[in-house]
Amino acid sequence: MKRSGRPPRHPPALSVSEARGVRTLHVGGEAVQSAMRLDDPQALALDYTRCMMAFLLFHPQPRDLLMIGLGGGSLAKFVHRHLRKARARIVELDPRVVEVARSLFHLPPDDARLAVEVGDGAEALAPDCADVLVIDGFEDESVPGALTSQAFFDATWGALGEPGVLVMNLMSDDPQLDRILRRMESTYGGAVLCLPALSDPNVIVFALKGAPARMAWRDLRERADRLEARYGLPFPRYVNALRRMNACDADALIVIPEPAA
């Protein structure tokens, strides 16, 4: 989880702890905002961050990513290391978080493919500015209202090129989960898919722009095998997990359900 939204009047407490070879970032409470394995700082230490990379099932070769929320920079580091043809712009509300990510979580300096800035992620959207939007903004354990409003999701549609993917981290026990999903479905014409994290209490949501109404399981499995070989993440398990929360049949994942008769 990472913070974004409008600046609080009193900045929340920020702390870093270490245990069993893992360094963790906490902002505003005990919730883990980010984690890093000390023996492999570039790895994705948390299950939910690995699951967020499942956006590659829907857009295998992104060129421009906009990330709202930095935390310790786990996803930014992974993208920078592995997606060599992609440019990533990361917007983080709290300048202290950026400083800690640089000094304690091995976030590399800006270069031609990585740009980190301090600002309000909800105000960072511009027409056709990215083909992948990564939304992971939290205040302790809650997503700021600025990142869950209908106006925000409508703005993400305009910010995405076509084809494009919005991937968003939510908590499975969030009482607003259904409402948030309905808003996303309204913006994206129903093309919204949910992936329950494999071990963390998170739900990763994908909103697709310019996607087909159906995606054959055979094609998804073949793509997952290629992605697993390339990135070392269990993409075939992500494909299987998509069956749990989405419409499907024996042949295909249904991206855009047919209207009820």
Image (spheres, helix red, strand yellow):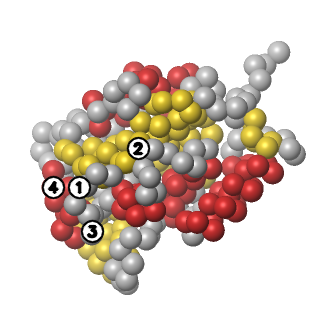
Q: Which one is earlier in the sequence, the residue at label 1 or at label 3?
A: 3
On screen, residue 51 above or below 129: below
Question: Circle 2 is placed at which residue position?
Answer: 65
> Which residue is disc 1 drawn over?
110
| Position in image of residue 117 (x %, y %) | 21, 45
Question: Between tags 4 and 3, which lies in front?
Answer: 3
Q: Earlier in the sequence, mark 4 or mark 3?
A: 4
251 sits left or right of 233 in the view:
right
Disc 2 on helix, strand or loop?
A: strand
Q: Is 32 located above or below residue 145 in the figure?
A: below
The residue positioned farthest toward the left in the image shown:
10
Quadrant housing the C terminus: top right
Q: At numbered mark 1, what does the secondary structure look like: helix, strand or loop? A: loop
Instruction: Identify the image quadrant of the N terminus.
Output: bottom left
Cα distance, mark 4 to mark 3? 13 Å
Q: Amino acid at mark 4?
A: Arg
Q: Which residue is mark 3?
A: 105
Q: Describe the element under mark 4 as helix, strand or loop.
A: helix
Q: Amino acid at mark 1?
A: Asp
Residue 261 lies, with reference to residue 91, above or below; the image says: above
Residue at 40% in and 64% down: 81
Local secondary structure at mark 3:
loop
